[in-house]
């Protein structure tokens, strides 16, 4: 997250607000990050361009008691002092546009190595998680399943990303039906964006 203020009291208020906030609190902008590494040994990668200024690394996962990990210590401030990489943006193979509430972009991707350019053109924060459905499983079966995780494999994705932001997600994909979803809750209704339309089937073939 990019943080507007360098005032320690304001930063501490932001950190406290994150624990219960449904959206990125005022005074911060979510820039994305890896969505997916959950088990010991998992790795995940995203590419985010940082501008000079104050930032924080945060983990928004919740403990059983409902507190976010960032409140338990998984928070680290970062000061970005200058551009470290000169030149332009990475060359993407496919584009995903995140909207309130839909994914736009090609629904057919070639197998192989990809660099997914994801932009948030909506007014709310968005993220995406990419799953590969098991062979023979349809999107409807997956969405209707009580335990969809038994019908798919997670590939990874992009964490909470604020309006106007762009990030890149590298992935190597084999043939098969994939699905993009966003699980961020709509602040007004509390419903996850996937229920409001942020689900898209991607055929890799
Ligand atoms: Cu969303």
Image (cartoon, rainbow, N blue to C red):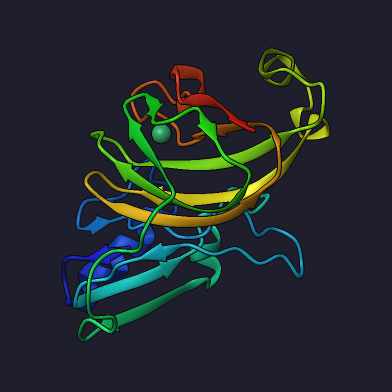
When asked about the image quadrant of residue 22, the answer is top left
The residue at 82%/28% (across/down) is 135
- Left or right: where 103 falls relative to 182: left
Q: Nearer the viewer, residue 122 or 87?
A: 87
When asked about the image quadrant of residue 179, the answer is top right
Q: Nearer the viewer, residue 183 or 117?
A: 117
- Pinpoint residue 193: horizontal percent, then vertical percent: 45, 27
- Left or right: where 190 falls relative to 97: right
- Pinpoint residue 74: horizontal percent, then vertical percent: 52, 71
The residue at 36%/24% (across/down) is 101
The image shows residue 90, relative to residue 194, as above or below, that is: below
- Pinpoint residue 92: horizontal percent, then vertical percent: 39, 53
Quadrant assignment for the C terminus: top right
Splitting the image into four quadrants, where does ligand 1 fall?
Answer: top left
- Pinpoint residue 10: horizontal percent, then vertical percent: 21, 68
- Left or right: where 127 falls relative to 148: left
């Amino acid at each position: 997250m990019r943080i507007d203020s360098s005032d320690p009291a304001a930063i501490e208020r932001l950190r406290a607000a994150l624990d219960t906030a449904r959206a990125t609190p005022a005074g911060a902008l979510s820039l994305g990050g890896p969505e997916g590494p959950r088990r010991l040994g998992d790795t995940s990668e995203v590419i985010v361009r940082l501008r000079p200024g104050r930032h924080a690394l945060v983990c928004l996962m919740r403990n059983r008691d409902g507190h976010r990990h960032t409140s338990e210590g998984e928070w680290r401030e970062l000061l970005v002092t200058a551009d470290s990489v000169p030149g332009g943006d990475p060359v993407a193979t496919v584009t995903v546009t995140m909207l309130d509430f839909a994914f736009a972009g090609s629904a057919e991707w070639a197998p192989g190595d990809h660099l997914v350019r994801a932009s948030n053109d909506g007014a709310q924060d968005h993220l995406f998680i990419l799953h590969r459905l098991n062979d023979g499983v349809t999107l409807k079966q997956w969405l209707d399943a009580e335990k969809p995780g038994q019908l798919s494999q997670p590939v990874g994705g992009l964490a909470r990303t604020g309006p106007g932001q762009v990030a890149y997600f590298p992935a190597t994909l084999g043939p098969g039906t994939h699905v993009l979803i966003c699980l961020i809750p709509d602040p007004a209704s509390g419903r996850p964006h996937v229920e409001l339309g942020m689900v898209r089937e991607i055929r890799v073939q």
